[in-house]
Image (cartoon, grey):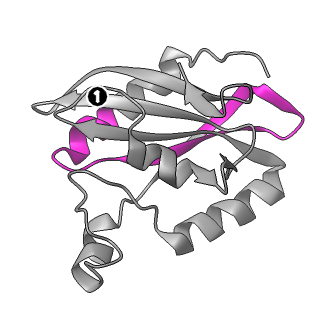
Amino acid sequence: MKRLAIPQKFLTPIFQQAEREYPNECCGLILTAAGNPEKFSRLRPCRNVQNEYHQKDPVNFPRTAASAYFMEPKELLAIQKEMRGKKERIRVIYHSHIDAGAYFSEEDRRIALCEGEPAYPGVDYLVVSVIQGKAHGSNLFYWEPGKKDFVL
């Protein structure tokens, strides 16, 4: 699959969401038409429920939303139902890093993989850097099969 360029009309609202949700990480999805993975159809911000899960189960959710994201499972199910009806698919999963750079962390990698392969084949990951409440850029990471890793 060829490298994507995310249009500014999608980046601007993602950056705005990241700034609004600071000092917590934001998260969401960029969807495409199922038959055309290079043409973005819509942005779907999601609720980061990491703090709620951390409070209920700090052993399995040791991080807070300041350094992790967890999309609300019921919301994800509803989105999947919407996507089926609109013949869409997930093309990009995005989240922000708080007071840190837009890099693909070991935690990001752990969440994105299942038995050494992408949990969501064909999905790229956008990471937004938010420093002191202001978005400072982003990087898009894609799966490189030869390297068995997500790369810029």
Magenta residues?
16-42
Examine the image and state in which quarter residue 4 appears: top right
| In-front residue for pair 93/40 | 93
Q: Is residue 44 visible?
A: no
Does residue 26 show up magenta in the picture?
A: yes
Q: Residue at x 27, y 85 (%)?
A: 56
Percent x, y for residue 132? 9, 31
Check the picture and name the quadrant holding the N terminus.
top right
Question: Can you identify the residue that label 1 sits on?
Answer: 129
Taking depth in this image into account, of 11 and 105 the one nearest to the observer is 105
Q: At which x and y percent is residue 144?
A: 68, 26
Q: Position of residue 21 (x, y in %)?
A: 24, 47
- Which of the 4 quarters of the picture holds residue 55? bottom left
Q: Is residue 130 above or below residue 29?
A: above
x, y (%) of residue 108? 44, 45
Q: Residue at x 32, y 65 (%)?
A: 50
| Number of numbered tags placed on the structure image | 1
Position of residue 68 in the picture relative to residue 80 (left or right): left
Q: Is residue 62 left or right of residue 75?
A: left
Q: Residue furthest bottom?
A: 56
The foreground one among 141 and 80 is 141
Farthest right residue? 35
Report helix, strand or loop for mark 1: strand
Q: Does the rendering let one see residue 130?
A: yes
In screen coordinates, is 73 left or right of 130? right
Quarter of the rendering containing residue 125: top right
Q: Residue at x 50, y 21 (%)?
A: 9
